[in-house]
Image: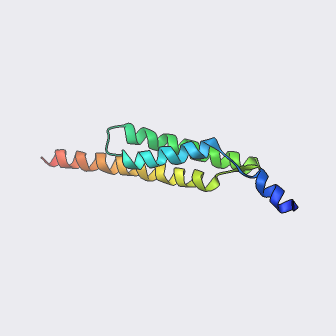
Amino acid sequence: MARSEVQEMERQRTSGLAIASIVCGILSLVFFWVPLFGFLLGIIAIIFGAVAIRQIGREPNLGGRGMAVAGLVCGIVGVAGWVILIAWIGIFFWAA
């Protein structure tokens, strides 16, 4: 085997936090309308994504940076969706 193939095989390990981040981020997008559930999943996705990105940067044999970033972005969008929904409901009921 060539040296680059060996290095590529060593990089096959994916960060568990990156996987957890993207799963929580996607679920926060799906469930942002559920009171507090989508918000909490989004916060967890943001935390896991940030920690995974830092962990991947420190350990060269760890992969999953794309998943960590995607989970971070999905978590931010899920939290923003929840905040917008709550603001919209508040304005709707305030006007009524």
Instruction: Using the image, determine if residue 38 lies above or below residue 5.
Output: above
Left or right, 71 with reference to 35: right
Q: How many marks?
A: 0
Q: Residue at x 76, y 47 (%)?
A: 59
**On the rendered image, what quadrant is the N terminus found in?**
bottom right
Left or right, 83 with reference to 5: left
Q: Residue furthest left?
A: 96
Q: Residue furthest front?
A: 1
Q: Position of residue 84 (x, y in %)?
A: 33, 51
Q: Position of residue 73 (x, y in %)?
A: 50, 54
Q: Is residue 79 visible?
A: no
Q: Position of residue 15 (x, y in %)?
A: 65, 45
Please identify the quarter of the rendering in which residue 40 is found.
top left
Q: Residue at x 32, y 38 (%)?
A: 35
Left or right, 10 with reference to 34: right
Viewer-proximal residue among 39 and 26: 26
Viewer-proximal residue among 7 and 94: 7
